[in-house]
Each structure stands twice: as C-alpha cells, then as structure tokens.
Image: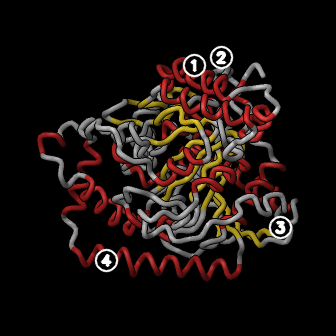
Amino acid sequence: MSDLSKLTASALAEAYRNRRLSPVEVAQAGLAAIEHHQQAFNAFCHVEPDVTLAMASASAARWRDGTPLSALDGVPVTIKDNIDVAGWPSRKGSAVVSAVPAALDAPGTARLRDAGAVILGKTTMPEFGWKGTSDSPLTGITRNPWNPACTTGGSSAGAAAAAILGIGRIHIGTDGAGSVRIPGAFTGLVGLKSTFGRVAAAPISVMGVLAHLGPLTQTVEETAQAMAVIARPDPRDMMATLPPMEWGHGLEDGVRGLRIAYSPALGQRVEVDPDVARQVAAAARTFESLGAHVEQVDPGFTDPVEVLLTLWNAGAALALAGIPPADRTRMDPGLVASAEAGARLDAATYVEALLYKRNALAETMARFHQRFDLLISPTMPLPAFEAGRLTPGHGRYGDVWTNWSPFTYPFNLTQQPAISVPAGLTSGGMPVGLQIVGAFGDDLTVLRAARAFEAASPFPQLRTGLHNL
C-alpha cells in the first residue's frame, strides 16, 4: 500500500470495502502527487482540494455505512478542460475564454458524480483541442513522463500525463480526430473512442459528428468500468441515442475464431517508424497465436484528410465566431488559421463532406467488416516527438499535424469504435500504440480483443520512479 498510484479501480474498491484504505487517504495522495509533479509535467489546469476532499469524505462515509454508490465510489478521476464540472471553469486551453464557473456538470461528469467518483481536477489541453499535440497559450506545454522533452500528444494531453503518472485511475478526454488515441499511443495507455452516440456531450462540441468522449486508463478493465458509468443517454444531446450496455460482458472471452485484418499503414503512403512497424507486426502474430484468423489486408479507402479538414475547419470557425480580432492575437496562430479557412468554406462543400463523402467512407468500412470482425493497425506511425512542436523536427511529415496522425481520424468520420493499447516500446524506450477498430456499434468486441492482447502481452509500465512519492 506504500504506492497508492499502482492500485487499480477494482483494487481500491476492495481496499475500501475491507477498510484497509479510505477514499480520503487516496484523494490526499492524489492531490499531493499533483503538487509534486505539476511543475515538471503540467497535467492540471484547475484543482480545488477542498472540493475534492469533500467528495472523498462523503465517499468514505458511504463505505463505512456499507452503501457505496457503485464500484467506482471513491475512485479518483480527472476531467479534461473542455468538459464541464459544475462550479469549475472550462477554459478549453484558451486565455481568451472566461474563467466563469460552469453552472452544470456535463453528462459524463454527472454520471461519475452519481457513481461517487472523486474528481481530482481538470486536465490541460491545446487551445479548443484543435491539434494533436500538448501545448496551449493558457497553460504552456504538457510533457510526457516517459521523456519530458517529448509531447504527450493531444488534445487530451493532461489526461494522459496524469494517467501514466498514476494520478487518478480514470481520465475523461475527448476525441475528434484521435485526441484520446494519440496521447494513448504516445504515453502507453488504453485510450477508447467508443461508437458515436454512446457517450452524451453537453454543451455539444463544435466538431459535431466527429467528437467523441472517452476514457484514458492504465488497464482495459478500468476502461470498461468507466464506460459502464459514462455511456448513458442524456436529454441534452440528441445524438447520444445508443442504449446502455453491459460493458464488462465477454471481456475475458478471448479472440479465438475472430477474423482480424492487419493493416501496417491502412493503405496510406505514410512513413511508419521501423520500431512501430515491428511492434505492431508482433501484435498481429500475438493475435494469431491466441486463435484469431489474421490476414494482412488494407481496408480499401484513400486518405480522407480533406473530408476531415473541411469539417474540422468549419468547427474551428464556429468556435471562434464570437471572438474579436484583437483577442485572436492571443490565441494559437494555427487555430486561428484553421478558423479562417473554415470561414471561407461554402455550404455545398461542407454538406458534401458531412453527408456524401463521409457516408461513402462509412459504407466502405461497413462492407469491410462483413469480412472482418476487427481491423488492427498502428495507432500512430511514430513515437512521441519533441514537445512544443506541431510536427516532428526532422521534417518527414511536413508542417501539418494530420500528416503524422493519418490512422486515427478516418474512424471519427465513420464513427466506429477504436481503441489504442500499448504494443511495446521503441529501441529508445518510448511507447508504441496498437489500434483496434471494430464495426459500428461493436464496442464489446474491441474491448474483448484489447483485453486478450493485454493478458498475452502485459503493457509496459513507466519505471522511472517519477510517479512514486
């Protein structure tokens, strides 16, 4: 019990039940860890210790009375800064957004609060979540605990840093083009983008049909536990229409007999780091050894980046619509450029991307999944690179961030479930992510495969001692 950061959500619940630990002790340890690591890694943008400790005290009383609200009662969690927590500001990584506290919890926050989870704080993100890296004008650079010179990826940047440091067990992020899976890959975490419509959002994201909410955790079981709580409809989100499901069902059933397509680069002309390629190829062999039928095949679509950017830039234009030019000078120039490009779009181009081109891609994948239960690929073609940069310094991916993240955003467009799980480490000691994609609505098979891989190839753990107090 000397290192509380290593106890999973289930282990914490068992310790509370047996009165070996109190939620107050765990919350105090989490708050101490935030203070200890904040200067080095910059994972948090808002913390209110008194509020957190009040939540923990209420949880401790319930456990003493034998009336916990759920298996997550007293489990420490964090919330990304674009997701509302009542009484706390949601500044979205932006210095021009008001610090006025949110009036209501977002749906996912409310469900976690209903379950008795203890919120440690809000986590950092790039401005309005517009890019896949980890710096913002409001909070500066969030750094990767595996190597502080490197980015965590984004936009769920602080969530990833907190998770890998063991500050909390469940970290709620958002994923509009890979923003849970990118940091999951760069920091060695489980990052799930579930089927669109599973998790409600309010206010609804300006990225609309691209935007998913999901957890970053250290284990597949904790991902399933998080989804069991947050994946519920809410009247504030008309698009969150999928009914609740049994997220732990079949988690230990393995992959024997599943048809898995292994695609080294999704058929795209992108350079994949040799260490990444080696680890993902080894993962494919692991699935084969577990009894799956694995075939190397590409899904058959061309890079849909123009479709993505049409919707992305339009969303950025909407996000910045009420911000005057003088304030935009204090914003991330890349975000401003994206918004300006979106403002120049005509309606027909937007509707064509939203409806026709996106539907064509979804139809391609629906036909593909008639042949294959799952698709596996690298999550990212490269390991984490220099913090504070939009693209790697070696220049191989140009100056556009989507050039180095071409494997994640196609599945935001199709709205399929996709998860990143750790596949191993590069020769330089940085995490590699394996992406597992399922057919629309088939989240449980994705989690089942992720758990089978986790059991067969235990995920690498951060061993620097940085997360030990």
Label 2 SS: loop
| Residue at 51% over, 52% down | 108
Along the viewing direction, whichever of 445 and 4 lies nearer the viewer: 4
Q: Quadrant of residue 319?
A: bottom left
Three-letter amino acid code of the residue under disc 1: Ala
Name the outermost residue toward the front: 65
Residue 351 - label: 4
Residue found at x 78% / y 59% = 251
Left or right: 169 in relation to 213: right
Q: Residues within 10 Å of mark 4 (few under 14, many from 20)?
A: some
The CA span between labels 3 and 1 is 45 Å
Mark pair 2, 1: CA separation: 8 Å
- Helix, strand or loop for disc 3: loop
Q: Is residue 153 left or right of residue 338?
A: right
Label 4 sits on a secondary structure element that is helix
For discs 4 and 3, the disc positioned in front in the rendered view: 4
Report the residue marked by disc 2.
469
Q: Residues within 10 Å of mark 3 (few under 14, many from 20)?
A: some
**N-terminal-most mark, 3 or 1:** 1
Mark nearest the camera among 2 and 4 is: 2
- Compare marks 2 and 3 and give the one earlier in the sequence: 3
Q: Spatial distance from mark 2 to mark 4, Cα to Cα? A: 53 Å
Observer-nearest of 355 and 424? 355
State which tag comes first along the sequence, 4 or 3.
Answer: 3
